Image (cartoon, rainbow, N blue to C red):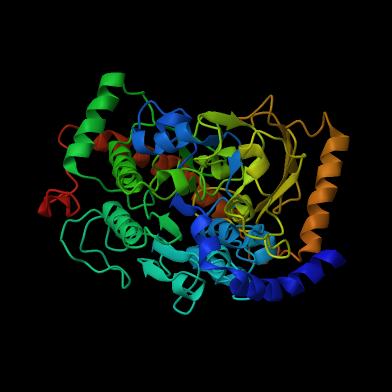
Amino acid sequence: MRKTIRLFILVPVLFSLISCQQSSEDVKKRPNVLFILVDDLGVHDLSSTGSTYYETPNIDRIALEGMLFEQGYAASRVCSPSRASIMTGKFTARHGITDWIGAKSGTAWRDHKRYDKLLPAEYVHALPKTDVVLPEAMKAAGYTTFFAGKWHLGNKGSYPEDHGFDINKGGWEKGSPIGGYFSPWKNPNLENTVYGENLSMRLARETSDFIKKYKDSTFFAMLSFYAVHGPIQTTQNKWAKYREKAVNTGLADAGYSMERNLPIRQVQDNPIYAGLVESMDDAVGLVLNTLDELGLEENTIVIFTSDNGGVASGDAFSTSNLPLRGGKGYQWEGGIREPFFIKVPWLDNTGTRTDYPVSGTDFYPTILDLAGIDSLPGQHMDGTSLKPLLEGKTLPERTLFWHYPHYGNQGGDPSSIVRKGKWKLIHYWEDGSQELYNLEEDPGEQENVQEEYPEISQDLSNKLHSWLAEVNAAVPQKDPEYNPKMDELRDTRITKELWPKLEKERLEFLSETFEPNADWWGSKITKD
């Protein structure tokens, strides 16, 4: 631990040295980086990862031309913490952003009238300026840095341009597309120019324009879609396409089952969400085509991932992550497993796959390593460079940690997780109970084997709690005003009112006469 502290103290010095030592010749030899981050996209929401409903040929191309990480994880089950981990190379309990920024915590949680047993832990509300985040490291190495889309890492004063991005198009404190997916949207950092313009395509155009302008330099471009976060919206044509596809495939009698706390979607047949996914894929295609047209594809690393699991429960109840359990906000694999692709054109790994467990914290050191930039081990403390895997080599077994001392909107429980090898242990903060899963034999986490393997369970529990103590993790507290009768009444409303309402809504979306409003969320104003 003493060595780590010393390294962290040296980060500002190393950062300054890197900045001073870059020659223009060195920078030109380095690869460009295109980092594509999607919001709320589930691990099975792509054709390349198993969906037979959604159509994503452009994203699939990245997977087919690079390496697909079959056990790729987000660092959190919700957005802001996961995004902060990508930026810092640290697990959430270490950087302190453990919930989506804006979520209520402590006694303020009672405002939701949830009547839960715990008061969620307090958390950091902006990306810490004491960190040398990824775009700052890239900028110091001579890269021109660009950001487009969802930020959600702090209010004004903690926007992308305050953390190393030269250009910011659309990044601010909001985590959803205020005003919707068709112009006019309400975003102070993204001007409305053409009413009816699709937001995902606009962000792609901004990214493409940046690449065209800086094609002769070395760039780090981050395209961070608001899609596919709710409110889910699409055009009438795309809705009709996917409605027909769902009907022709054969509709399931029911779309939901009851998970521990909320109903959860069991089928991928939401035509609105499918259209939203396709629009986002179209936007990815625009940017990839720009790289091809400019002859930049052979010197551009392309990364694709999501910030948390697909929304199967809560929010818009959009998709299903089966056979994985749960979704966004949940402690099970459906909440944290992600599409995770890295394409490095000069490495011979086209169409390869690996089942080595990796995390969003790994992008930072991996990008530095691939770009030939000195690592900052005192900064990206929880990340590992994946370059050896991309080169066909191996990495030693590692331990991954997650910490979410909150309830959230989707039905998950306040809990912390440790994974080592095939074993995953979940610790629940409400009652101290634990679940142990063998992910090789039970990836759907249906069988808690804690009693069968008490020694493994205890070892992982010790590792988890020692690590949480080491990073001074904030934990939730018992609510002295907890009312079990009100809690039970809420559960009854969920099963008797919400669940039937969701089933009815699913069929309405699939009805031939469905129409959200006259102009289809504003998409009919133009041909886009």
Task: Pick the residue in front: 358 or 307.
Answer: 358
Taking 483 as reference, is 59 above or below it? above
From this viewpoint, is residue 20 visible? yes
Give the quadrant of residue 72.
top right
465 to the left or right of 385 = right
Give the quadrant of residue 387.
top right
From this viewpoint, is residue 478 visible? no
Q: How many marks?
A: 0
Taking 173 as reference, is 196 above or below it? above
Residue 144 location in percent, x, y?
Answer: 45, 66
Residue most extreme to the bottom: 157
Residue 215 location in percent, x, y?
Answer: 37, 58
80 to the left or right of 482 = left
Residue at the spot x=58%, y=68% of the render?
22
Residue most extreme to the front: 25
Residue 423 location in percent, x, y?
Answer: 75, 35
Taking 125 as reference, is 330 above or below it? above
Image quadrant holding the N terminus, namely: bottom right
Residue at the spot x=59%, y=72% of the render?
19
43 to the left or right of 396 = left
494 to the left or right of 252 = right
Residue at the spot x=61%, y=45% of the render?
331
Residue at the spot x=52%, y=48% of the render?
308
